[in-house]
Image (cartoon, rainbow, N blue to C red):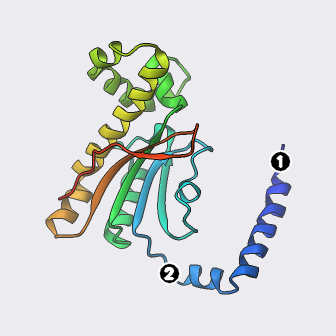
Amino acid sequence: MFAPKDLLARNKTWAGKISENNPRFFAELADQQTPKFMWIGCSDSRVPANQIVNLPPGEIFVHRNVANIFNAGDLNALATLQFSVDVLKVEHIIVCGHYGCGGVLAALRGDRHGLVDHWLRQVQIIRDQHEDELADLEGEPARHQRLCELNVASQVRHVAESYVVRDAWERGQSLSVHGWVYSLHDGILRDLGVSVNP
């Protein structure tokens, strides 16, 4: 188990190794931020965006929350989206869910956990909209996996329907929205084939 002071020490070791391999790395990183990708992912600590796509810091602009939800009423998500699209001019927005998501499982089961229940209501709505499809699947693990995928597809639509993205498309900006899901069991990302282009 690490204590906060251990994290600070690990940071110094990491920064030292980076500087040793590329003495200009931090100076170049500080000079600009020009990512081509925005990542809307789950807060789950097992799904670090840069690491699972093998990109260094500065390549992905990240927004994370429980169950990778894009809610048009969430000012944090909207501000992050607007900054990434209008200021950074990202070209790809990736909504990435993951199999084994605890938030999606709670929504599937209707579990109660307090304040987060309000946040997960959106996933429960998706569950209810696909009740017949989910009921046809054998066992909770299969239903859980499918609801993770359905949630990603729904969030891709929500992002694509946002005024930020629609305005960018009306301006002729090059921008696509993609839906991926990550497997904790093998570390592989899967494209769900729900991409939206102008």
Q: Is residue 110 visible?
A: no
Q: Where is residue 52 in the image (x, y as percent from the top left)?
A: 56, 54
Q: Dot 2, how many residues are within 10 Å of its Cα: few (below 14), some (14-19), or many (20+)?
A: few
Using the rendered view, name the quadrant where residue 134 is placed.
Answer: top left
| Residue 42 in picture, x, y percent from top left | 50, 43
Q: Where's residue 130, x and y in %?
A: 28, 22
Residue 38 position (above or below residue 22): above
Q: In which quarter of the image is residue 16?
A: bottom right
Please rate how many residues cluster around mark 1, counting C-alpha atoms within 10 Å: few if below 14, some from 14 to 19, many from 20.
few
Q: Which amino acid does label 2 sit on?
A: Gln
Please identify the quarter of the rendering in which residue 13 is found.
Answer: bottom right
Q: Name the residue under label 2.
A: 32
Give, as a three-letter code, the residue at label 1.
Phe
What residue is at 54 percent from the left and 84 percent from the top? 31
In this view of the protein, can residue 100 be seen by the observer?
Answer: yes
In space, the residues marked 2 and 1 are separated at their CA atoms by 32 Å
Secondary structure of the residue carrying numbered label 2: loop
Q: Which residue is drawn at 34% across and 62% down?
A: 92
In which quadrant will I find the N terminus?
top right
The reply to whether discs 2 and 1 touch (Cβ–Cβ < 8 Å) is no
Disc 1 designates what residue? 2
At x 46% / y 13%, what residue is drawn?
139
**What percent of the width, then of the height, locates residue 35?**
44, 70
Residue extending farthest left: 170
Query: What label does residue 16 carry, if any?
Result: none
